[in-house]
Amino acid sequence: MVGAAGRLGLKAPEERAVLGRDNSPIASVFISPITTVHVDDERLGRYFAPLALSVASGTSATE
């Protein structure tokens, strides 16, 4: 994505921004550095799994 945007003549950071996840070390080697964020997948799963199951079963997540 970064390369394709550059080939289109888009400038960073003035005209585009790229965001990655999981603090990937490779983000620092791009010509235009990528901002990365840490995502706690286990925590997200613990939060959203019960919600998804309640939606699937047709019950309220707060019941």
Image (cartoon, rainbow, N blue to C red):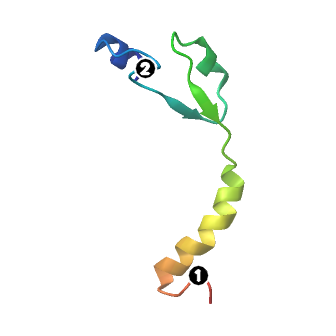
Location of residue 20 in the rendering, given as x and y in whole percent from the top left corner: 55, 32
Circles 2 and 1, Cβ within 8 Å, touching? The answer is: no
Q: Residues within 10 Å of mark 1 (few under 14, many from 20)?
A: few
Q: Is residue 3 above or below residue 48?
A: above
Q: Looking at the image, is 57 positioned above or below residue 20?
A: below
The amino acid marked with disc number 1 is Ala
| Residue type at numbered disc 2 | Glu
Residue 53, percent from left and from top: 55, 76
Instruction: Work out how far the residue at label 2 is from the one at label 1, CA to CA, in angstroms.
Output: 43 Å
Mark 2 or mark 1, whichever is nearer to me: 2
Which of the numbered marks, if any, corresponds to residue 14? 2
Q: Residue at x 54, y 80 (%)?
A: 54
Residue 61 tag number: 1
Q: Please state which of residues 45 and 34 is positioned toward the viewer in this rendering.
A: 34
Q: Residue at x 45, y 17 (%)?
A: 12
Q: Earlier in the sequence, mark 2 or mark 1?
A: 2
Q: Is residue 6 left or right of residue 23?
A: left
The residue lying at 62 percent from left, 16 percent from top is 28
The residue positioned farthest toward the front in the image shown: 14
Q: Which quadrant of the rendered structure holds the C terminus?
A: bottom right
